[in-house]
Image (cartoon, rainbow, N blue to C red):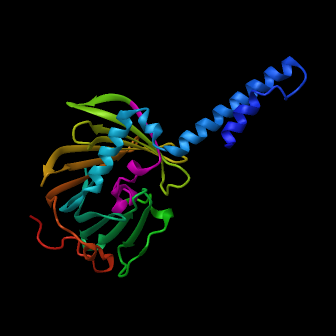
Amino acid sequence: MTFLHRVVTLSRSGKFGRYPEARCGRYAFGTIQASIVLLMLFSLVDPSRTFAANPDLETALTGSRKRIERLDYRVTGRLTRVEGNGTRTSYKVAAKAHWFPDGLRLLCEISAPASAKTSLLLHMSVNGHVSIEAVLPGETTASVLPFERWNDRLVGTDFSYEDMVESWFFWKNQELLAPERCGARDCFVLKSMSGAQDRTYYDSVTSWIDRGIFFPVHVVKTLRGTGGQKEFIYYGLRQIDGIWSASRVEANLQGKPGSSMLVIERGSGRAKLGLKDFDVSQSSAQGKKVK
């Protein structure tokens, strides 16, 4: 006899006590126990049943994750900080990324001006766990970037080191909010909430995702502890070699003057990269000439 069968059988038995009131109370208690056991069994058998109850949530998550899992690109461009008074400081940027069986690798190099030269290697595993190695300005060798520095401003811009990958789409806690329009685009609105297992400075990330191409057009990240928010707007969505990307991403800390822009000038969406292309100690993120 299974455990579940014993619970149901005992709950229906008259052997719980002499008084009808006691039997009724215990019968109800036993029925509740059986229901709890059933819920536990169902959740163990099919952990994805939460998504099954909301097919749009599964569609938004699956589409976003598959988009990331197809990444294989090289790009060059510039990273610009615009102060509140209009003063601009620009940096030359090159990056490349590829999804491998163990997750995403992204190598980014800021090469000019020379005083700001920085190389970053970010690895995001298939469950969204992130690690970062870096060669920072003035350094000559790569080292693991401590988690305490992940929220530092990358060369003084509004982008942090952690902002370079979209790890929130792989967090366990996901909620679909009411759909909205962003300009001319119909969007899923996905709220991703970090858990204790997620190494991140963000408590939650809300993404407005184009329903047709599963690319974000607007993202708001809420910082842990302070509740401060950082906003990202994606402009000029386009296809490069069949892969969707943004030609410009603008970031700003809400309530703070100025903003920062990552502008992509040239790129290839099918770079055919391998592990050898992601050695941060020998990095030249420009690699071979970009198409």
Front-lying residue, 51 or 147: 51
Magenta span of residues: 154-177
Extreme residue toward the front, this view: 1
Residue at image x 31%, y 28%?
Answer: 180
**Residue 288 point in image, percent of width and height:** 14, 73
Q: Quadrant of residue 165?
A: bottom left
Tell me what residue is drawn at x 79 percent, y 20 percent.
24
Q: Is residue 247 positioned above or below 218 on the image?
A: below
In-image side of 223 versus 267 (left or right): right
Whole-percent x and y of residue 178?
38, 28
Residue located 50% across and 42% down the image? 227
| The magenta stretch spans residue 156 | yes
| Residue 245 shown in magenta | no
Residue extending furthest toward the top:
20
Q: Nearer the viewer, residue 146 or 131?
A: 131
- Residue 213: x and y in percent read 22, 42
Q: Taking 6 as reference, is 176 left or right?
A: left
State whether residue 103 appears in this view: yes
Q: Is residue 84 visible?
A: no
Instruction: Residue 257: name its quadrant.
Output: top left
Q: Which residue occupies the foreground of this view, 157 or 195?
A: 195
Farthest-out residue, right: 18
Quadrant assignment for the C terminus: bottom left
Which quadrant would the N terminus be assigned to in this image?
top right
Disc count in the image?
Answer: 0
Can you give x and y, in whole percent of width and height, for residue 96 in the image? 24, 65
Above or below 3: residue 291: below
Residue 84 lies, with reference to residue 81, above or below; the image says above
Residue at the far left in the pictured view: 291
